[in-house]
């Protein structure tokens, strides 16, 4: 995992911790515990994940690979592969627009009942 690798590299190079299994266990457990604490503390964490995930997940999964494939291979216009890629691009853009709107709506509607650690 890149995040764990970055944390462990900083601990070893900058803070002079000895590398090994104990460092990995402590660093990873601390990171997961902190992330869990943040998820529990922020009551609208799921809505935030949907909001930011809509911006990040749809482009990187649906339409950017299709755009790159179309740019590299240049299939014939209106062929099956051209049409399939354009369907994925359109659906990905729609998903990128609707997912953050839905997540923001969820955050706004349930903002009245939010309580920390509930």
Image: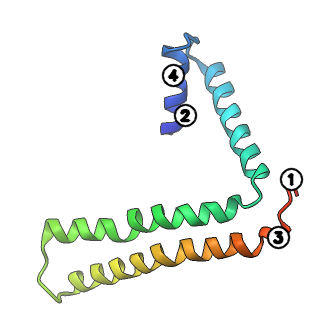
Which dot, 2 or 3, sits closer to the camera? 3
Marks 2 and 3, how far apart at CA? 36 Å
Determine crowd level at label 4: few under 14, some 14-19, many 20+ residues with C-alpha closer than 10 A: few
Which dot, 1 or 3, sits closer to the camera? 3
Marks 4 and 3, how far apart at CA? 41 Å
Task: Point out the tag, 4 or 2, that comes first from the N-terminus.
Answer: 2
Residue at the outermost bottom position: 78
Which element is circle 1 on?
loop
Query: What residue is disc 4 on?
Result: 10
Does residue 84 sit above or below 48 in this rendering?
below
Marks 4 and 1, how far apart at CA? 32 Å
> Mark 4 touching mark 1, by CB under 8 A?
no
Task: Point out the tag, 4 or 3, that comes first from the N-terminus.
Answer: 4
Task: Point out the tag, 2 or 3, that comes first from the N-terminus.
Answer: 2
Q: Position of residue 20 (x, y in %)?
A: 58, 17
Residue drawn where x is 39% and y is 62% of the image? 60
Task: Place residue 71 in its image quadrant.
Answer: bottom left
Query: What residue is disc 2 on?
Result: 4
Task: Point out the tag, 1 or 3, that comes first from the N-terminus.
Answer: 3
Query: What residue is disc 1 on?
Result: 117
On the rendered structure, is 15 left or right of 65?
right
Query: What residue is disc 3 on?
Result: 112
Quarter that holds the C terminus: bottom right
Which element is circle 4 on?
helix
Determine crowd level at label 1: few under 14, some 14-19, many 20+ residues with C-alpha closer than 10 A: few
Q: Which mark is residue 89?
A: none
Which dot, 4 or 2, sits closer to the camera? 4
Marks 1 and 2, how far apart at CA? 27 Å
């Amino acid at each position: 995992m890149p995040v764990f690798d970055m944390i462990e590299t900083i601990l070893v190079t900058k803070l002079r911790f000895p590398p090994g299994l104990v460092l990995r266990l402590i660093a990873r457990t601390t990171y997961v515990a902190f992330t869990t604490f943040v998820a529990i503390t922020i009551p609208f964490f799921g809505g935030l994940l949907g909001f930011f995930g809509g911006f990040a997940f749809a482009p990187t999964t649906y339409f950017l690979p299709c755009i790159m494939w179309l740019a590299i291979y240049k299939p014939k216009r209106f062929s099956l592969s051209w049409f399939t890629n354009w369907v994925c691009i359109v659906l990905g853009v729609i998903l990128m627009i609707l997912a953050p709107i839905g997540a923001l709506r969820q955050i706004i509607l349930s903002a009245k009942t939010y309580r920390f650690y509930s």
